[in-house]
Amino acid sequence: MYLNLFIVFLIVSLKVNSQNQRDSIINKSITKLDEVILKGNTILGNKFASKNRTGSSFYLSKYELSQFGDIDINRVLDRIPGLTVYEEDGFGLRPNISIRGTSPERSSKITIMEDGILAAPAPYSASSAYYFPSVARMSAVEVLKGSSQIQYGPYTTGGVINFVSSEISDSLKIDLENSYGSFRSGKLLSRISNSNETLGYLFEYLNFNSDGFKTIEGGGNTGFDIDEFLLKFKIDLFKKYNTNHTIEFKFQNYNEISNETYLGLTESDYDSKPLYRYPSTQKDKMIAYKNQYVISYILDFSDRFKVTTSAYNNFFRRNWYKIDDIVFNGESQKISKVIGDPILYENHYFFSKGIINSEDDYFKVKANNRRYLSKGIQTKIDYHWYGKGDSFNDLEIGIRVHYDEEDRFQWEDNYSMIAGNMGLKSLGSKGDQGNRISSANALSSYIMYRYKNKGFTLTPGLRFESINLDRHDYGKSNSLRDESNLSTRENNVSALIPGVGMNYTFNRNFSVFWGIHRGFSPPGNSTGQSPENSTNMELGARFSVNKIRGEFILYQNNYKNLLGSDLAASGGTGELDPFNAGKALVNGFEFFIDGNFYKDEKLDLPFSLSYTFTNAKFLSNFESNVGIWGDVSNGDFIPYIPQHQINSNLSIKYRKSELNLSVNYNGSFFTNNQHVDKIQSNLIFDLSIFHKINKNVSLNSKIINLLNNKYIVSNVPAGFRPGHPFGIFSGLVYSL
């Protein structure tokens, strides 16, 4: 494979000189297409590129992200058709995202990137996103859902989300944003950036915090505090020569303390006190830390030929200390069972509420202590040329060598509760609740070719994944990790992932596109387990009529080997072992329009409307002990995927003022295959107001859940959880 890449690289290099003589006669309208050669940290680059791809995509610009100043990624992604999210904490700290019916738990079945680099703590060996990029510091959000997403893996069934961080500015730029409001919630963002012909830098600091909107009877913190630092440097070398060399360095640091829990409420408790938390959660706390280093070397041979190489190292550590079991008369029960049936486990339930004193160690609080490492090097070669009849050709080749691991070293402490206050009774033995290292070595590569002639575009592509997954289990009574009782297992898989997309532009107002590709998700480390695979198709059209632009898409994902995952976040045991769930079918319809009702020099009335219909069903029978799925019959709906979603945004811009209204409807959805529990639909209104005082200073205010609707967002992993109640926030934006 390396030899083949070298040969292609050599051939392309030889063709560069012969193409340079044609620069003066190139169609300028085509060369301006930003989809040709993108910046190394983007996959779309702008809205124009998004609207001209052969596969479906979506681009949220910096302005769109700033309209509501959201820190909650759930509220941001609600705008994008085809994406489904279910909330957990009300602030978007740990989103659960599905793209076109993929399993949403911990966003583990989609490819998440920041600046083109895999962002999940261990994307191959433990893909659950316990860390997620903070949308408040992003300059854009890019989403691919169609056949062209095979450029980005390993998860190719649903799609990819790329978060584009702040760019180094061409001149001195200073930004300050702050806001404060309900529940003592605050956000502070500061940024300074500058560059000249040779050097550039950016420094950014983000803090957001809150006391939380839930209360623990007897007292206790339900809020969070997150700090992030971002540092970028850029050096441009040899600009006076035809070949430009750029070195970019990025460092990111993330620190989180959040007093979050897995324990929700029973239905009756939610009905009476939806913002209440049981006293047994007062010790629950997540402490997380992350460092990322990325160094990139960009080699510009010409405006036709570019090579980008990035080496990255991500270290992430977290310890989520939270109530896991409740004991009564020597009988230990998981909190999900206690809350799921408070009558059967009445005494366990009373213990959790502090109604009955528990002088012995009746509360097991688990330290989910884990360390993650993700590192690798990736190269992208991009070359384009013009053929006969001014046809346009673009060849993109990428290769990535990657390693990641999850190190579990967990224990369980025991507590009592007297008069509603928890007290430590005994410390657990380190490693007795998990003492193992899971790792993955992966080699991936792809080749994508784009041919364009007049209104016709064809993009065939092929991706290759070769993955070695293994697990070293040291045993629960082996805190020193000697290898006397070491248990190992290993799984090796490889896959070719083809895809092809087509687009035909009839005129500037109408185009159609079609694509088909293979969906792929890596398996677990159980020996012989096969990867998840599917056949994915889409058919869509883009149109422009007067001042209205839009697109509509039909799609179908046919799973032949659906994999479920035993996540604690979805009510399972937390072992993360994938299991075979057989066949499934997901199909649906996506619709999006935007435009202006009216626009002149003083008044602008822009709007957008999106609708998503998703039909996600199992096509086989199987049994599982995982809470979110359970025993499945042919025809059951896949849990946590609503059939109907609608989002609408309306703005009124007058002179220096702007008002934005967001309306979001999430349809009802089942929470398990038995269809016993069902989360009802909700309709939420958000409002923001901006006023520009002068060219540098603006005032902003926003209201979350304008009508203060009471709504349930989920009932996993253990009990019902409320959405964010009414909240109002105001602040100042300064930009120089």
Image (cartoon, grey):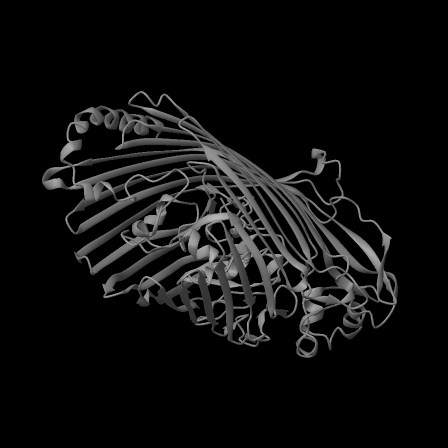
Q: Is residue 175 above or below residue 509?
A: above
Is residue 335 at least partly visible in the picture? yes
Q: Is residue 732 above or below residue 354?
A: above
Residue 112 left/right relative to 230: left
Q: Position of residue 530 (x, y in %)?
A: 45, 49
Is residue 626 at least partly visible in the picture? no
Q: Nearer the viewer, residue 409 or 707?
A: 707
Q: Is residue 398 above or below residue 626?
A: above
Residue 35 left/right relative to 427: left
Q: Nearer the viewer, residue 498 or 130?
A: 130
Q: Is residue 319 above or below residue 658?
A: above
Q: Quadrant of residue 571?
A: bottom right
Q: Position of residue 73 (x, y in %)?
A: 52, 57
Number of marks in picture? 0
Q: Position of residue 320 (x, y in %)?
A: 69, 51
Q: Nearer the viewer, residue 325 or 40?
A: 40
Q: Quadrant of residue 449?
A: top left
Q: Position of residue 373 (x, y in %)?
A: 58, 38
Residue 115 left/right relative to 366: left
Q: Residue at x 75, y 47 (%)?
A: 432
Residue at the outermost left position? 389
Image quadrant occupied by the N terminus:
top left
Residue 165 left/right relative to 587: right
